[in-house]
């Protein structure tokens, strides 16, 4: 099935989804967040068909979101997040937190994200004003920027 | 094409993507963030086939992310975000900001999100510690929670 591309849309959300909105892509990135991962490790963790995993990984490497790193003393390599990939972290954490809230396990949170140094749980991701106040959706407006014109 | 469901995965990200990870779904929600929208308005804004839009909207209503509201003095209705839908805002804003950074328009930002009351631009969405410090990805750890067991 050939999808209509979002690439022509002059919208930053559509542009982001054109890259990370394919099925499995964010789950592949989830696994990359806790250290470089080899192909077989990803395949085992995700239970994803190998051809689809290969396609998703190639695309992520082409886009500069993952990079191949050699594994010491071997010809093998692992996939690691670049800066561009690491910058997806707030989006991924916000989706995880939404899933935890609205599709919870009856036994409680599945994973607890902590600050390594203190062991304290992190905050839920929120939208904030310049001076740091949490903003509700109805407090946020939008104005067209220079990039919106033709 | 029938997709393998993510529903069986005991992962909050997979659970979130099972609901909002279908193509178009986040773009439909984007349009709902700035006020209730009627079917034809959504169809025009998105350029999406009517049958796909209808399927996405029905799913979002079933999931309690959108609700139908009657439009005054008419038999028509509009789709509005519920609390559950509004809580997707940090995830959507984080994706928009990533798209703005890495898939920019050469002319500058496409949209500028502001705090309505002050007109000031909002902050980029970040992951923070309990006491409000911004955390980089390598400062964040994860421990299994009670919901991870069988």
Image (spheres, coloured by chain):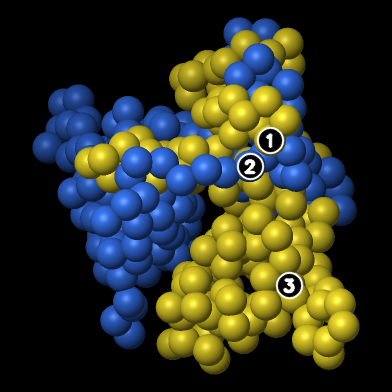
Chain colours: A yellow, B blue
Secondary structure found at label 1: loop
Which residue does the numbered mark 2 point to in the structure image? B141
Nearer to me, A6 or A30: A30
Disc marking residue A116: 1
Secondary structure found at label 3: strand
Nearer to me, A46 or B18: A46
Disc marking residue B104: none
Provide residue B82's location: percent of width, then percent of height. Answer: 29, 31
Q: Is residue B120 among what the camera can see?
A: no
The N terminus of chain B lies in quadrant: bottom left
Which residue does the numbered mark 3 point to in the structure image? A79
The 10 Å Cα crowd at callout 1, few under 14, some 14 to 19, many 20 or more, is some
The chain carrying label 3 is: A
Provide residue B41's location: percent of width, then percent of height. Answer: 38, 47
Q: What residue do we see at 41% from left, 41% from top?
A: B145
- Tell me where residue B22 sits by quadrant: bottom left
Q: Is residue A123 among what the camera can see?
A: yes
The answer for how far apart the CA atoms under marks 2 and 1 are is 5 Å
> Answer yes or no: do the residues labelled 2 and 1 have beta carbons within 8 Å?
yes
Q: Is residue A24 above or below residue B2?
A: above
Q: Counting residues from the N terminus, which is met first, the one under dot 3 or under dot 1?
A: 3
């Amino acid at each position: 099935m050939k999808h209509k591309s979002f690439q022509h849309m002059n919208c930053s959300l559509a542009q982001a989804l054109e890259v990370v909105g394919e099925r499995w892509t964010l789950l592949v990135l989830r696994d990359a967040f806790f250290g470089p991962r080899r192909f077989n490790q990803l395949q085992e963790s995700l239970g994803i068909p190998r051809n689809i995993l290969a396609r998703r990984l190639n695309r992520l490497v082409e886009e500069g979101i993952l990079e191949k790193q050699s594994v010491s003393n071997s010809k093998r390599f692992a996939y690691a997040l670049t800066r561009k990939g690491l910058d997806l972290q707030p989006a991924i954490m916000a989706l995880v937190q939404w899933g935890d809230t609205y599709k919870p396990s009856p036994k409680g949170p599945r994973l607890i994200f902590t600050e390594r140094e203190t062991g304290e749980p992190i905050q839920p991701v929120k939208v904030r004003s310049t001076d740091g106040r949490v903003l509700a959706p109805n407090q946020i407006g939008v104005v067209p920027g220079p990039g919106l014109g033709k």
